[in-house]
Image (spheres, coloured by chain):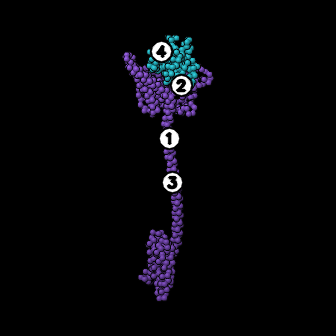
Chain colours: A cyan, B purple
Amino acid sequence: MKILVVDDEIDVKDLFQQRFRREIRSGEFELAFANSGEEALTYLTSRPLEVVLILSDINMPGMSGFELLRHIRSEFNAPPPPVVMMITAYGDAQSEQQATELGANDFLTKPLDFTLLKNKLRHIM
Amino acid sequence: MENTYLAFPFAGLALLFVRRTLDTATRLPDWDRALKKYWAVGGVTLGISIATSTDIAELFWAVAFAAIGLLIWLERSYRPARTLLLALAPFVVIYLFSKLIRWVLPAFHETYDDYFSSAGAFAMLWIIVFFFIANRQKKDLIKLQQERDQEREVEASLRRIEAEQRRRIEEKKQELEYLVAERTTEITRQKDELEQTLVELKDTQSQLIQSEKMASLGELTAGIAHEIQNPLNFVNNFSEVSVELLDELAEEQHKPNRDLELEAELLADLRQNLQKISQHGGRASSIVRGMLQHSRASTGQREPTDLNALSDEYLRLAYHGLRAKDKTFNAQFSTDLDPDLGMVTVVSQDMGRVLLNLITNAFYAVRQRQKEESVTGEMAYQPTVRVQTRCQNGRAEIRVIDNGTGIPESAMGKIFQPFFTTKPTGEGTGLGLSMAYDIVTKGHNGTLSAESQEGEGTTFVITLPA
């Protein structure tokens, strides 16, 4: 399963790679990373249909997570539509509602609970 | 004997006349008292002379002439005395001459007795005339004396009036001096009060500046919390992962056929994680340091500062600060930083305060517009705040650009004035922009200006000598 992680924090890549090292080694998950909404769109354009799940931060300079979600739902929604999980440091109801309205499948708050995330991912598979 | 009868009263009258003319009662009181006794002593002498039938007329005349002569001598500077001398002299001379002739040449005296008598009569007449003259003179003198007395009285009353006036002037002067002293005290008191007030105002001013700093710190706190949370998440995550890695490493070491390549990879990852932990820990402390610096009084120390980094830092802090206070708020923010800007020498703390203020204002403006548009049902509005840096003509330029409500033309001239605010009471001190203005212009020789289009947005431009 290919997962695209979108976050402006570069170290997120190292973190995810280590948190999911067993899964990656076993070939359970395949991780790709983008540092901005724009980069994520470029990635999606170059590899349509590959990505099954997108984990995106909401607060990013430039294109925000919501903006990216809107693009995904309008341009990269070919069935099966990718599962999108939005991540934010602000766990407020308004943001969650907005994410849901824009077509997010799930809403996670930072700091990420990786055990919970893994369970959710396995559940999707 | 008849001579004696006549000589006694005549000599007495002559004395009386002289005493009155010369005013001996006041001028020579001792002599006067002695002469008064003439009548008593003379009366007794006369009685004795009658009883003994001796002719002592000459004695009376001798006493009278001696007394008169002495008085005139004593009073020679007194004008009536000279008149008197003139009046009496012929009589005395004729009297003495006739006595001398009668004694030396009695026959001749007998012959010319008529001449002597008429000369004596003439001398008497002379005396009478002089008596009137002397009287007149005396009256004139008295009159003169009275005039002098009057003059003296007038002078005295003039002096009294003068003294009275002086006293009044003195009183008035003292009154005025008292008033002046009173006024001076009053003015001094007021001056002291004003100085006290000035000190209080200065205190209040510094308190206001401090409270403005604290207010902006309040705005920062939430942003700072968010900014610290991110590195802390990394610290936590990387340490947790590292424990996992260690477990895996230990597990691998106990295997009979150890995968040394995997062990090396695990160790490399561990090293990298520890580096990340320290790096993110450092990031967190630098944010805390920045926060402390912001709240502390400015050291005023200019130092080469990366304005790009400063702008980026405060943009994030301001956004997250606002975001944390108002969860419904969402805005795009971006930076457009000129990599050629390099280091600019500024008081970074102060400049950070300026940037924070301008950026917070920008976010406030876009939030206001967002609220207004959501009321009118307009959904297309995308709140945006941009910070742009440029290096132009040897000057560093920072622009804080928003597409918020904009500033009305009427307020444009007042925005840099202290205490001017459009925010509701209690929300803004009205000191932010005025302090920013002072910091940029007075503190850094720069300029701070604003361009605004109501309903379109505002751009604040800082230029600094690079």
The answer for how far apart the CA atoms under marks 3 and 2 are is 84 Å
Q: Residue B259: x, y in percent?
A: 38, 16
Could you tell me the amino acid type at mark 2? Answer: Gly
Given residues B166 and B284, the one toward you in this image is: B284
Q: Measuring 62% from the left and 23% from the top, which residue is drawn there? A: B376
Q: Residue B134: x, y in percent?
A: 51, 71
Given residues A27 and B308, the one toward you in this image is: A27
Which residue in the rendered view is the most extreme toward the front? B256
Q: Are marks 4 and 1 on the same chain?
A: no
Which mark lies nearer to you, 3 or 1? 1
Q: Measuring 52% from the left and 15% from the top, which residue is drawn there? A: A125
The answer for how far apart the CA atoms under marks 3 and 1 are is 38 Å
Disc on the earlier residue, 2 or 4: 4
* B125 to B210, vertically: above or below: below
For mark 2, give the secondary structure: loop
Could you tell me the amino acid type at mark 1? Answer: Glu
Given residues B280 and B460, the one toward you in this image is: B280
Q: Which residue is mark 4?
A: A28
Residue A91: mark in rendering: 2
- Report if the CB atoms under discs 3 and 2 are less than 8 Å apart: no
Q: Circle 4 marks a residue in which chain?
A: A
Q: Which residue is mark 3?
A: B174
Could you tell me the amino acid type at mark 4? Answer: Glu
Q: Residue B163: x, y in percent?
A: 51, 58
The answer for how far apart the CA atoms under marks 2 and 4 are is 29 Å
Q: Measuring 49% from the left and 30% from the top, which residue is drawn there? A: B221
The answer for how far apart the CA atoms under marks 3 and 4 are is 110 Å
Could you tell me the amino acid type at mark 3? Answer: Gln
